Image (cartoon, coloured by chain):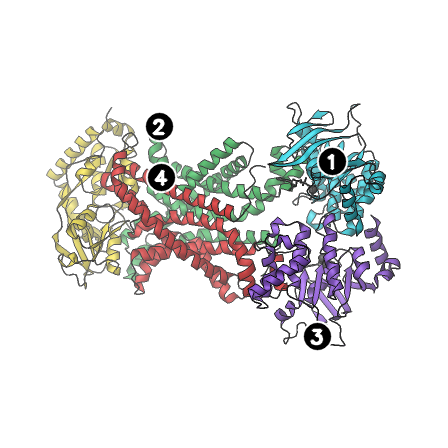
Chain colours: A red, B yellow, C purple, D cyan, E green
Amino acid sequence: MLENFSFRTIVEYLPLFGQGLVTTVWLSLLSFAGALAVGIVLSAMNLQRGWLFRVPAKAYIDAVRATPLLAQLYFLYFGLPRLGIILPELVVGILALSLNSGAYVAEIIRAGILSIPRGQVEAGVASGMTYVQRMRLVILPQAFKVTIPPLLGQAIVLVKDSALLSLIAVAELTRAGQLLASDRFMPAEGFVTIAAFYLLLYYGLKGLAALSGRWLGLQPARSSI
Amino acid sequence: AGTLDEITKRGELRVAVQTQGPPFSLVGAAGERTGSSVELAELMAKEMGVKITFLDFDWDGLIPALLSGKADLLVADMTPTLARAMKVAFTKPYMYTGSTVFTKADSKFKSTEDCKAKGTKIAVLLGATGEKEAKTAFPDADIKSYKGGGPLLLDAVNNGQADCGVNDVSAVKGQSTAYPAGSFTIMPDMLSKEPLAFATRYDEQDLLTWMNLFLDQVSLDGRLQKNLDYWVNSDDWKKDH
Amino acid sequence: MTNPSKGRTGMIEFRGVNKWFGALNVLKDITLSVEPREVVVVCGPSGSGKSTLIRCINGLETIRDGDLVVDGQRLGDPATNMTRLRTEIGFVFQSFNLYPHKTALENVTLAPIHVRKIPRAEAEKAGRELLAKVGLADKVNAYPAQLSGGQQQRVAIARCLGMRPKIMLFDEPTSALDPEMISEVLDVMVAVAEEGMTMMVVTHEMGFARKVAQRVVFMDAGAIVESGTPDEFFSHPKTDRSRAFLSKILRH
Amino acid sequence: MTNPSKGRTGMIEFRGVNKWFGALNVLKDITLSVEPREVVVVCGPSGSGKSTLIRCINGLETIRDGDLVVDGQRLGDPATNMTRLRTEIGFVFQSFNLYPHKTALENVTLAPIHVRKIPRAEAEKAGRELLAKVGLADKVNAYPAQLSGGQQQRVAIARCLGMRPKIMLFDEPTSALDPEMISEVLDVMVAVAEEGMTMMVVTHEMGFARKVAQRVVFMDAGAIVESGTPDEFFSHPKTDRSRAFLSKILRH
Amino acid sequence: MIWQQLQSLAGSYPLALRGLGMTVMLSLISLVLGTLIGFGLGILRTGGNRLISGLIGAWVDLIRGTPFLVQIFLIFFILPELGIELDAFTAGIIALTNLAACFICEIVVAGIRSVPTGQVEAALASGLSRWHRMRQVVLPQAMRIVLPPLVGQYVLLIKDSSVVSAIGLTDLTRVGWLVVQRVPNGLLVFFLVGLGYFIVCYPLIMLARRLEQRMGAAHGEVQL
Ligand SMILES: Nc1ncnc2c1ncn2[C@@H]1O[C@H](COP(=O)(O)OP(=O)(O)OP(=O)(O)O)[C@@H](O)[C@H]1O
Ligand SMILES: Nc1ncnc2c1ncn2[C@@H]1O[C@H](COP(=O)(O)OP(=O)(O)OP(=O)(O)O)[C@@H](O)[C@H]1O
Ligand SMILES: [Mg+2]
Ligand SMILES: [Mg+2]
């Protein structure tokens, strides 16, 4: 397959890959925004003392983590119409990605909040702040800092996961490669190109993570033991 | 030494299949691999006097398997387009079929013409020839490409995620049997007439020649027709699988 | 700055207070009254319950039985609004606990703006004055990480003063500091005491105790073992335990 | 226990040592010689380079220019086996740095078993004796988290002694301790000094300096500003900087 | 109709069991191998050698940054062109092991870096060799940080193993695809597939949470 590797065909398909890339980027962005929303709500529920909110949030997070995205996607895609809800594929896809990533985001936020030293909470309590004030003024701004890098890690996962949406007829990046593979029978060209584009996105996000780390003044990791 | 020598020496014919669904290639209730194409391949191995090994790939893996030499030939309900033939060698066609349009029985889309309306949601299979044809036949429609086989197209149309589906007529007929009779309307007119063929590599000329001869033979002695009558032109297979 | 409170009773009144952590009785039948404008130093061996004692006063720990009345309000009483009460009590931690994401000035103004609802401009003006008072006029916009330990602790004290509390509690405010920074913090504490603040200070800085405390309270194993003026306590400790303790901390 | 070394030169010899952290010159032209069996106390304000100075001796920091000769071996010389040399040098940290997942005895025997290749049984016997010597015979099987700070630091000293080093370095060994625990650690250090160990001790415990040090070295801003016997240094500090420093740490 | 589909599904249980077996087998082997290799890579990556550390870093990035499907294709279909012929199962194991090793390497690196500098310095100061420092001092402490995300990563890898169906292995997800040909009810079929994964993964998630709580308790986790 490699000896006849045809760069010309790749160039010919480049506009298609371009469109796919654009779709992947904006649907990932939307899904990530959704995941943040879902994650914030879930982690807020998860941090409650009472079981009423905590238990459903935990159950949801576990169920999402323990099952493949594919199953979740089909669950929504085939399941919603049975309830009479027919949504466009893109919407279902973004919903599935948001609901899936949201569970992971919730865990990241929770870990971030719990990483804030006890003394910070006590300082807030001692100066007469209410729970909401403490959260808003003391804990969340600090937790925000420590959650940025893992959140960007989750964004990387989400971008790669979005490839699964090609299954429900969303024309994103992976699909462009599949098209090249099936129209021209050039799988190597198709998939290597996809890989290159995903790698590009990966390095973009990684660079962003490094930059944000520097902006936020996080310590660079020690390099050797 | 040619591929045929190799196969004989190996004592094994390696066939890549894609399990697209009835009637060409499916997995029966007990997990057995069967279908029209599958039985033809088995017949080939029998005539060669070797045993057969099926390599089961999804669409993504099918072509690489052939091109990388993991499989000797590829047996699927595949249309030999000219673009594809730039890469792999197709046998002569062993049957003709074509894409057709189907809708849910009580749909407001009653004919192929109805489906040409702007914004109609049309389900096709990713990479299948039906995808191309739908694009030309329904330029104003909203074409949705699905992966994972014909039955999912039926499911999408049945659920209302698409208004119509376009797929190989034999596949639609075969696969709609999983639904209560009369669930779907299959339009009588065809979007295209297409051959189906097996594929192998261009560096396997001996095997290609042999396969063409095989197809001639089985159509002359009626075994091909028997296979097609059982699998494609009737529901007889449902009784056994 | 202070606001001497309602007549008879002490500003802080422990009456037979007990506290348990699980099976451990960390405060044993504590009875203690601190008058308005009084400065009380608490000392004792590690684990004797000093921190727990003062943390009860602003409700960072809850007590099991006995009464604890602060500024006339009984803790644990449903009628007592703890959040309100806490605004009357400043608490200085051993480990400073400044908000690392806020500048010195923001640390000082955060609670006045959001809890006392003082207009930002006014709060900032007061904040600058307070920082100047603790000798940090030039560090107004520095973040905690840019300050030495002694400077951080002085910001923490200014942060408490910003709420104009009636009571200030200190939990070993100098023991996380380098030796040369201890005096700069003690100087600020002395100044606060001299303005008439009611203070309870857990510390082993005996120089400070001699200078400003009206009373030294010695705790051991959760109980108040001895209590008296600094002179009495340092010159004539009454119990073996306090003698042993003093010999250890004063020897080197 | 000690093993006085090869004749003329000091056990530790700094000759014109310089060290930079980036643009910061943290050690400036340090020249200093420590004789076998000598005890040298290093003091000075925070950030003056005291820790850096003693960390260079066992190669926890590397120097940029100048010579540093320890026990006759020049650091940075390819012929010098640092890992070997380090076994001759015990280092006691401010924050103890006991291995939290090992018991007191395991902390003491880890290096003897794996580095000195002493049979386990023998190492454990020696370890128990050492723990007894620092007053912790009953804590042999306790984990660090179950020990007080003073106890942890005593285990850390025993851990160093277990390697039978020729030199012991201490970096503020008591400044993370509660006041009553300081003396128990200082007592152990005094005992070690009295057995004739070569020691360099960064500390502000002036009682200790007066008692066992032959020399006090005062550092400021990376340079050795003054050096003399404890009596000279405490009674007649020669420079303004040392006077100012002493007034701060001795005042309270 | 649902009833008929359920009956038809029930008939496919041997296939489903085989698929589940394949998923478990693949995951088990590659997770064990991946853990060993991942620890090795992690230790090398935190070592002093910049070249080795840089190479490992670049490799991990490459693997994390590209779709697993592409990796598996390269190993199964392209390696033969270099004369390395692998059967599908071996190729699947190699691809998954490599993926696991790369993710685990990152976790191990984070764990090792979380061990306080003082611990390493204490070990250095007492003359412990690099191997003993790792073995006796750093790794045992790093495990506290490593274990919970490690188990969490196992769950992700088990789910990723479904991609091997592209090279012709019949794992649990592939069984779903095959069955849906005959029983065209995506909701039902993939619900059951999800259930299969849930049965394998949920205990691991519980384990990860238990570990996290144990570690958290040791650190004194707080209520807000
Ligand atoms: N949250 C807690 N849970 C259980 N036990 C606790 C808790 N906090 C403190 N203790 C225990 O209560 C006792 C008193 O603790 P406290 O911190 O009040 O002592 P302290 O006198 O302040 O000591 P130090 O000088 O070390 O600060 C100790 O034995 C301590 O171990
Ligand atoms: N790893 C490092 N990187 C950069 N600068 C450092 C590093 N370690 C120490 N320094 C700087 O070097 C100077 C000397 O530090 P050192 O720790 O030796 O001082 P010290 O006298 O031990 O102070 P202290 O009493 O606070 O322990 C300080 O200004 C410090 O900020
Ligand atoms: Mg305390
Ligand atoms: Mg130091």
**Secondary structure under badge 1?**
strand
Check if mark 3's residue and mark 1's residue have beta carbons within 8 Å: no
Estimate the spatial distance between the alpha carbons at disc 3 and disc 1, rounded to whole Å: 57 Å
- Image location (x, y in percent) of residue E118: 65, 41
The chain identifier of the residue carrying mark 4 reads A
Mark 4 vs mark 3: in front: 3
Pointers 4 and 1 within a single chain: no
The residue beneath circle 2 is E83
Q: Quadrant of residue B225?
A: top left
Question: Which residue carries the number 4 mark?
Answer: A196
Measure how far apart labels 2 and 4 are at the Cα level. Answer: 25 Å
Q: Is mark 1 within 8 Å of ligand 2?
A: no
**Along the line of sight, the residue nearer the viewer: C170 or C131:** C131
Q: Which mark is residue D224?
A: 1
Query: Mark 2–mark 3 contact, CB under 8 Å?
Result: no
Percent position of residue C220, x then y: 79, 60
Are both tags, 3 and 1, on one chain?
A: no
The quadrant of the picture showing ligand 3 is bottom right
Answer left or right for B104 relative to D241: left
Q: Chain of mark 3?
A: C
Q: Nearer the viewer, mark 2 or mark 4?
A: 4
Q: Amino acid at mark 3?
A: Gly
- What amino acid is found at the position of numbered circle 2 in the picture? Gly
Image quadrant in which the N terminus of chain C is located: bottom right
Q: Quadrant of residue C95?
A: bottom right
